[in-house]
Image (cartoon, rainbow, N blue to C red):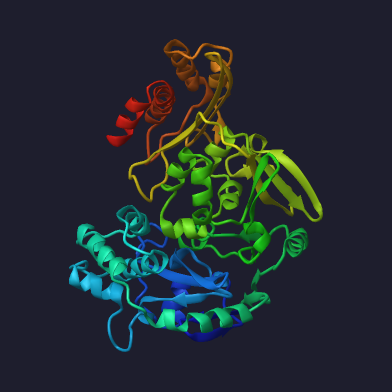
């Protein structure tokens, strides 16, 4: 059973198929067709809805892709769709702004834009163009262009008016806080278990090691929406507060595996600007609101953007199976394509980084689109120096092999050598021995290798001629 608020209406669902996405639930079960299906893969934003959940004494609003969100994620939250925005028969301020600024033509993408604008308005005190661009980067429009939509964002954020959601917020908070533990959601032989604690999760996963763990689900949902498969048993972990915690423990930064990427952004941007810059390009705001760093690692995708950075930073994983914990260097975690060192019933509990990021750490992502796109190549670089000689080297790439991987021969060419162009070129040539990348629709093998070598050269420029590196970035 799950309970949630559909705007202000309490919904109790006891027999929903756990494989049901929020998009299909809205359109097929509730007849709410304002939420559109465009891509069914989280790329276009036409299906954007907003989830509100308690955060202290206020509500936190998050835009999410309904096509990638399973109904189990609704438990204890308020679901807001475009149908809910009207205010006493009048358009909501964000809808009126889209009208006034001529932000819609064919209209198919408009409900998704409106919901992203609604979320932006709720989470900002005043309009900031960069913040608006981030909020709307996951919404694609083929006919209007984005200037009038950004104008609508400015109008909506500069002139917000109290709405019914503000009026009902104290009542909504109270009602959501009254919803506690959920019982399993099941139908037609398919089940979704909803543990409320780490101990309960560990016990359930030991009992059902064949189950799929569901955190953000931004990749897992594709098995249903793109591959048309069913998942017979899911263990949803999004309601376990301990998995969302981030803490400083002595000389270590410990990141809960279930922390959403959008929640990690301010902390990781402060930890090191390079991490923040790359995380800002990690898919769209909707994806970052759901996706987790632990899920990105456990997924073991060769093009996951988190792993190369964590490899270059010598990250450790804290793994748990039942009551037993163990630490494993991330460098030993990836065994092959989509294969990891996790044992049956074992899961990632947290990711551990050094408390202080190295000053000379850098990371860059190369993709066809600047925003909301998967990497062709992602490179991360972490070198330390002693009187002009390279003392240690951590160089890692995604998109270059069957797994995210350290460039070990390249690192060997660097360690103990003076930091100069000749050393760098020898290391760049060693990358051809470290990797034999595949060719696919994102990039050819030759292009990937050249990009990896050029990213290493860019790292040299970034440390030896920072102003030139800034100019290179500005012209990308």
Name the foreground residue: 18 vs 44.
44
Q: Residue at x 53, y 49 (%)?
A: 267
Residue 341 quadrant: top right
Residue nearer the viewer, 248 or 391: 248
On screen, 117 above or below 306?
A: below
Q: Nearer the viewer, residue 157 or 415?
A: 157
Q: In this orientation, does residue 476 appear?
A: no
Residue under the image location 66 percent in, 39 percent down: 333
Q: Residue furthest right?
A: 323
- Check the image and name the residue furthest to the bottom: 88
The residue positioned 55% from the left and 54% from the top of the image is: 292
Q: Is residue 452 above or below residue 342?
A: above
Of 290 and 27, nearer the camera is 290
* Residue 446, horizontal then vertical, whole percent: 38, 27
Image quarter of the C terminus:
top left
Report x, y in % for residue 306: 53, 43
Q: Is residue 43 above or below residue 254?
A: below
Residue depicted at 30% across the width and 72% down the height? 94
């Amino acid at each position: 059973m799950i309970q949630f608020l559909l705007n202000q209406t309490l919904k109790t669902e006891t027999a929903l198929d756990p494989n049901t996405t929020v998009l299909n639930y809205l359109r097929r079960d509730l007849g709410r067709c304002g939420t559109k299906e465009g891509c069914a893969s989280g790329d276009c934003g036409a299906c954007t809805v907003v989830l509100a959940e308690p955060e202290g004494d206020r509500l936190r609003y998050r835009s999410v892709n309904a096509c990638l969100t399973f109904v189990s994620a609704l438990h204890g939250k308020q679901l807001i769709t475009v149908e809910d925005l009207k205010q006493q028969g009048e358009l909501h301020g964000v809808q009126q702004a889209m009208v006034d600024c001529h932000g819609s033509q064919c209209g198919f993408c408009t409900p998704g834009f409106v919901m992203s604008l609604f979320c932006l308005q709720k989470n900002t005190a005043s309009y900031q163009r960069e913040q608006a661009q981030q909020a709307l980067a996951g919404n694609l429009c083929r006919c209007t262009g984005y200037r009038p939509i950004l104008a609508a964002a400015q109008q909506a954020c500069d002139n917000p008016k109290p709405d019914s959601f503000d009026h009902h917020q104290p009542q909504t908070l109270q009602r959501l806080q009254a919803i506690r533990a959920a019982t399993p959601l099941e139908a037609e032989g398919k089940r979704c278990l909803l543990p409320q604690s780490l101990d309960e999760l560990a016990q359930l996963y030991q009992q059902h090691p064949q189950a799929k763990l569901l955190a953000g689900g931004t990749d897992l949902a594709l098995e249903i929406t793109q591959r048309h498969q069913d998942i017979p048993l899911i263990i949803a972990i999004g309601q376990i507060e301990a998995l969302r915690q981030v803490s400083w423990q002595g000389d270590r930064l410990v990141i809960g595996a279930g922390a959403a990427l959008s929640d990690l952004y301010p902390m990781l941007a402060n930890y090191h600007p390079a991490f923040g810059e790359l995380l800002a390009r990690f898919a769209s705001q909707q994806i970052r609101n759901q996706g987790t760093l632990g899920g990105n690692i456990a997924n073991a995708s060769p093009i996951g953007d988190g792993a190369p950075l964590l490899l270059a930073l010598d990250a450790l994983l804290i793994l748990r199976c039942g009551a037993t914990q163990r630490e494993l260097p991330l460098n030993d975690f990836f065994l092959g394509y989509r294969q990891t060192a996790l044992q049956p019933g074992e899961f990632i509990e947290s990711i551990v980084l050094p408390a202080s990021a190295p000053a000379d750490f850098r990371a860059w992502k190369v993709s066809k689109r600047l925003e909301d796109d998967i990497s062709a190549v992602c490179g991360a670089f972490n070198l330390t120096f002693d009187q002009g000689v390279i003392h240690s080297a951590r160089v890692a790439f995604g998109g270059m092999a069957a797994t995210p991987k350290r460039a070990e021969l390249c690192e060997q060419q660097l360690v103990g050598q003076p930091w100069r162009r000749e050393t760098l070129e020898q290391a760049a040539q060693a990358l051809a021995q470290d990797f034999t990348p595949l060719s696919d629709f994102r990039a050819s093998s030759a292009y990937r290798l050249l990009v990896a070598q050029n990213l290493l050269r860019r790292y040299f420029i970034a440390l030896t001629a920072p102003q030139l590196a800034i100019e290179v970035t500005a012209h990308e």
